[in-house]
Image (spheres, rainbow, N blue to C red):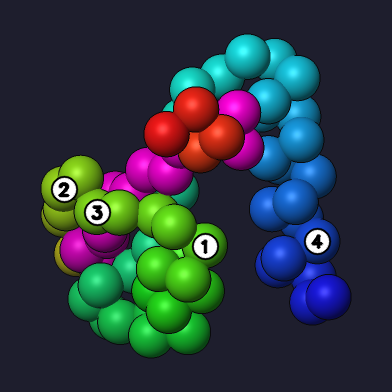
Amino acid sequence: MGVGRLLYSRIYEWAAQSQLLTICAEMNLDPPNHESLRFHDKAGFVQMGTRRLENGKCVSMQIRPTINELQNV
């Protein structure tokens, strides 16, 4: 298991224990971070919007249900 997957598995556990319904993340669209976009797509994140930052970067704002919520679907 890679570092990213290990980190997110701990985040999913913490979120479920904390009774959180969703997890949020954002990743660069401009300049693009293709690896991060693929990683989050495979992890079940979906884009809810985009945002242009003061430094000119554009980011994808994404959410994913917690493990508890996925089990209830």
Sequence-earlier tag: 1 or 4: 4
Residue under numbered circle 3: 47
Instruction: Give the amino acid type for the residue marked by disc 1 in the picture.
Output: Ala
Sort mark 1 into few (<14), some (14-19) or many (20+) by Cα contacts within 10 Å.
few
Instruction: Give the amino acid type for the residue marked by disc 2 in the picture.
Output: Gly
Split into 4 quadrants, where in the image is the C terminus? top left
Task: Identify the secondary structure beneath mark 3.
Answer: strand
Q: What residue lies at 24% left-to-right and 66% top-to-bottom?
A: 57
Q: In the rendered structure, are the residues bearing label 4 and label 2 in contact, judged by CB atoms less than 8 Å apart?
A: no
Instruction: Determine if residue 7 is in view.
Output: yes
Instruction: Give the amino acid type for the residue marked by disc 4 in the picture.
Output: Leu
The numbered mark at residue 51 is: none
Q: Is residue 54 above or below residue 71?
A: below
Residue under numbered circle 2: 49
CA gap between label 1 and label 2 equals 18 Å
Residue under numbered circle 4: 6
Q: Nearer the viewer, mark 4 or mark 2?
A: 4
Sort mark 2 into few (<14), some (14-19) or many (20+) by Cα contacts within 10 Å.
few
Q: In the rendered structure, are the residues bearing label 1 and label 4 in contact, judged by CB atoms less than 8 Å apart?
A: no
**Horizontal side of residue 71 vs 54, given as left or right:** right
Q: What residue lies at 51% left-to-right and 38% top-to-bottom?
A: 70
Magenta region, residue range: 57-69
Q: Is residue 58 above or below residue 32?
A: above
The numbered mark at residue 43 is: 1
CA gap between label 1 and label 4 equals 12 Å
